[in-house]
Structure formats: C-alpha cells, structure tokens
Image (cartoon, rainbow, N blue to C red):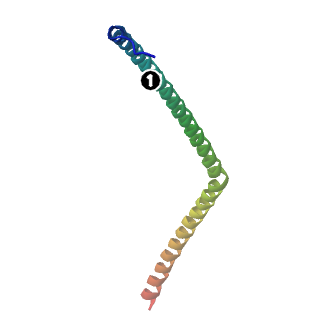
Amino acid sequence: MLPPPRRWRCRRFVVGAPVAVVGGVIAYRYYRRISAGAKRSFNEQVDKVEKTYDQALDDLTRRERARLTQYGKQVLLPIFSRLDTLAQRNELQEHKLNEYLKELETLRRGIEQAG
C-alpha cells in the first residue's frame, strides 16, 4: 500500500490537533469530576467511621461507668460501712481510755498527797 500524499497528512494534523485539545479538555474535566467524587466518597466514609467510633466509645464509657457504680454499691459500700462502724467504736474506746487516764491521774495525785 502506498503512503498517502503529503497534503493529506497536513490536513490530518489540522483536524486532529483541535480534536485532541477538545478531547483533552473533556478528559481533564472528567478526571476532575471523578477525583472530586472519589474524595467526597472517601471523606464521607471517614466521617462515618469517626461517628461510629465516637458512638462506640461513648457506649463503652457509659457501660464502664455503670459497672463501676454497681461495683461501688455491691463491694465498696459494705466496706465503708464497716470502716465507719470501726471508726465509731475506736472513738468510743478512745473516750473511755481518756476517762481512765483522768481517773488514773486523780488516783496518782491522791496517793502522792497521802504519802
């Protein structure tokens, strides 16, 4: 097959260059639209994951707080109640001991004055 004459090559270039420019602009606009859509989709998915994470963390915190409150009621309340009882008993014993010390001091003075 014979190559086309030179004038046909020039016409192809004259017609092909504007078509390539228009096609390039269209392809660039399509690329921008597709990339913007992909970014938007990715950001929506990240926002969804963040929201799910925040909800899970809030739920976990709420459940842990409830568990600790229940633990405090079941375990720590009886312990603190017992400690309060022991503190009251110790205060009573300290008061009695102070009374005995006063009585001992009174008896000591009486013995020293008699002797």
User: How far from the left and from the top, in percent, is residue 90?
Assistant: 56, 67
- Residue pictured at 42% horizontal, 15% vertical: 2
Q: Quadrant of the C terminus?
A: bottom left
Q: Is 115 on the left or on the right of 90, as rendered?
A: left
What number of labels is visible?
1
Q: Nearer the viewer, residue 77 or 84?
A: 77
User: How far from the left and from the top, in percent, is residue 50?
Assistant: 51, 34
State the residue lying farthest toward the front.
2
Q: Nearer the viewer, residue 99 or 72?
A: 72
Image-quadrant location for residue 56 = top right
What kind of element bears circle 1? helix
Q: Nearer the viewer, residue 107 or 40?
A: 40
- Residue pictured at 47% horizontal, 78% vertical: 106
- Residue pictured at 56% horizontal, 42% vertical: 61
Q: Nearer the viewer, residue 113 or 82?
A: 82
Q: Is residue 19 above or below residue 61?
A: above
Q: Is 3 on the left or on the right of 85, as rendered?
A: left
Image-quadrant location for residue 88 = bottom right
User: What amino acid type should be assigned to the residue bearing mark 1?
Assistant: Ser
| Disc 1 target residue | 35
Q: Is residue 28 above or below residue 97?
A: above
User: How far from the left and from the top, in percent, is residue 97?
Assistant: 53, 73
